[in-house]
Structure formats: structure tokens, C-alpha cells
């Protein structure tokens, strides 16, 4: 079965899929919050240090582990521990990231519904219909309440299932080749828009300043480390699984 495992059709398809797995809401929402709380540039310095260190070790390691196992984390960890006669222990360890991803996926289905509703509302005009901040907040509160977003959440799940039905190459890879460039284009447009807003210069000054007190604070380094793991999707699951679909000819360090 492992010899017949599907693989990505192209190197860039694999890279875009990995980026899509790593750059999620945890980065879009949490990264600017932590930059703000922990001293702007003082947070970015340890963050980039950890990103380079983890990317050059953990990401390469997980991709290699996945390709060698040609399987998900449960079987991969089980395979390694089986050499010591403790396959069940390994499978138990592999279950930890799987359960963690399941918990995250349950929460993300709600967010997917929000995103789909706002995306459609952008074209219909419903998203920008509220005239005040209070009205925006009220509408979001109603949507975020219990049973306030069920239809959009179900539609988002159906859309994801349709992509997964087509598999890795024809489904996930093709979807990321379309969605990820759009995602980056939207961020470039947003960045240009923000640059011309009142107070933008003050914001840039804060982001790139270095506060000695903040950079010496252990919390800055701890949260920067956590954010780096978020940014790279290193936790024994996503990168490992995508690595299991890599062909033997792929240069893993280069892709990482």
C-alpha cells in the first residue's frame, strides 16, 4: 500500500500546500497581537531567529520522517518504536498530534463559515453594509452566537470535502495553486492600503523599534518560540503528512 501512495505533482504545489497548512488564523490573528504586546521589533528578532533554527532542523526532519514512513503520524511513530518492540507506545505518541489537529479542525470549521460568509458578502455588498463599528460588532456577535452560522459552516465543510475527494495532486495541490496566490495578492493590496492610512508611520515605527527591556524579557522569547512553531506548522502532524506524499526524487532541504 505504501508503494502506491499518491504524491504531489510539482515542487511548487507541495510548497504552496505546506504554506497553506502553516499560515493559518493563528498567524493572521495572533502574530500582530504578539508583536504589539511584546515590543514590536524586540519580538521580531527572537522570532526570526527561531524560525531559521526550526526551519533548518524541525521542518526538514518532519518532511524526511513523513517520506520515510509513507504514512501519517500514528503509523510513522509506531514504525519507529516498533524497532524497540514498542509499536503501541509509538502509536499512542502519534495519536497526540492527531487529536490536537482534530480539536483545531473543529474550531476552524466555524471560522471557515465566517470567512465564506464575509467573502460572499464582499461581492453582494452585505459585508460593508453596516455604517458604524457598533453595527459591525452586532452583526458579528449574532453570527458568532450559537446556531448563528450553521448554513455557512456546512457549506464550507462541503467545499473542503469536495477538494479532499480529488486527493492530493488533483485536489489539495490544485486548490492551493489557486488560493494561495490570491491570498498573497490580497495581503499585498491590504499592505498598500494600510500604508496610506492615518497613523501608519507611527505603526511602522513601533513595529521596527527595539526595546531593550522587552528583548531581555523571557516572555518575549517564549512567545516568539511558540509563534515560530505556529508559523512553520511543526508539531508532528501537518508537515509530516505532506512529507509522506513527497516523491523520492524531491530535494527536501531545498523545499523546506
Image: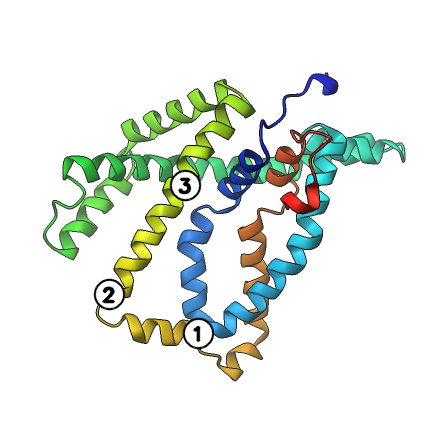
Q: Is residue 91 visible?
A: no
Estimate the x, y position of residue 121 in percent, counting from the top left: 20, 37
Residue drawn where x is 57% and y is 35% of the image = 14
Q: Which residue is mark 2?
A: 196
Q: Is residue 88 left or right of residue 211?
A: right
Q: CA distance from mark 1 to mark 2?
A: 18 Å
Residue that sits furthest to the left in the current view: 131
**Front residue (pair 20, 82):** 20
| Marks 3 and 2, how far apart at CA | 23 Å
SS for tag 1? helix
How busy is the neighbourhood of tag 2: few (under 14 within 10 Å), some, or many (20 plus)? few
Sequence-wise, which precedes: disc 3 or disc 1? 3
Q: Residue furthest bottom?
A: 212
Which image quarter: residue 202?
bottom left
Residue 234 visible at all: yes
Q: Is residue 88 above or below residue 211?
A: above
Which residue is drawn at the image coordinates 90% and 35% (left, top)? 84
Q: Which residue is mark 1?
A: 208
Residue labelled with disc 3 = 181
Q: Please give the name of the residue rendered at 64% of the width and 53% of the height, measured from the top-left corner.
A: 55
Q: In this picture, is 50 found above or below 55? A: below
Q: Is residue 113 above or below residue 193?
A: above
The quarter of the picture where the N terminus appears is: top right
Q: Where is residue 157 shown, x and y percent of the image? A: 39, 26
- Regarding mark 3 in the picture, which secondary structure is present there? helix
> Mark 1 near mark 2, Cβ–Cβ under 8 Å?
no
**Which numbered tag is attached to residue 248?**
none
Find the distance from the CA under tag 3 to the CA under tag 1: 27 Å
Amino acid at each position: 500500500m505504501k508503494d502506491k501512495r499518491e504524491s504531489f505533482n510539482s515542487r511548487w504545489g507541495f510548497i504552496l500546500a505546506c504554506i497553506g497548512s502553516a499560515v493559518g488564523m493563528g498567524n493572521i490573528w495572533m502574530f500582530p497581537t504578539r508583536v504589539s504586546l511584546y515590543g514590536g521589533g524586540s519580538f521580531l528578532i527572537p522570532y526570526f531567529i527561531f524560525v531559521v533554527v526550526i526551519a533548518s532542523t524541525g521542518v526538514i526532519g518532519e518532511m524526511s520522517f513523513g517520506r520515510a514512513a509513507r504514512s501519517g503520524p500514528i503509523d510513522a511513530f509506531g514504525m519507529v518504536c516498533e524497532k524497540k518492540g514498542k509499536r503501541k507506545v509509538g502509536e499512542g505518541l502519534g495519536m497526540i498530534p492527531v487529536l490536537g489537529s482534530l480539536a483545531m479542525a473543529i474550531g476552524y470549521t466555524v471560522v471557515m463559515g465566517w470567512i465564506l460568509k464575509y467573502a460572499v458578502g464582499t461581492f453582494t455588498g452585505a459585508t460593508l453594509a453596516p455604517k458604524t463599528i457598533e453595527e459591525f460588532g452586532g452583526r458579528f456577535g449574532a453570527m458568532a452566537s450559537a446556531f448563528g452560522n450553521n448554513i455557512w459552516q456546512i457549506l464550507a465543510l462541503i467545499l473542503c470535502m469536495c477538494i479532499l475527494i480529488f486527493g492530493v495532486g488533483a485536489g489539495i495541490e490544485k486548490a492551493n495553486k489557486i488560493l494561495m496566490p490570491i491570498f498573497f495578492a490580497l495581503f499585498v493590496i491590504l499592505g498598500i492600503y494600510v500604508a496610506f492610512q492615518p497613523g501608519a508611520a507611527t505603526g511602522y515605527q513601533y513595529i521596527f523599534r527595539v526595546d531593550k527591556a522587552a528583548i531581555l524579557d523571557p516572555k518575549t522569547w517564549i512567545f516568539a518560540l511558540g509563534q515560530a512553531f505556529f508559523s512553520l506548522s511543526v508539531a508532528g502532524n501537518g508537515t509530516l503528512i505532506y512529507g509522506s506524499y513527497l516523491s523520492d526524487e524531491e530535494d527536501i532541504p531545498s523545499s523546506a
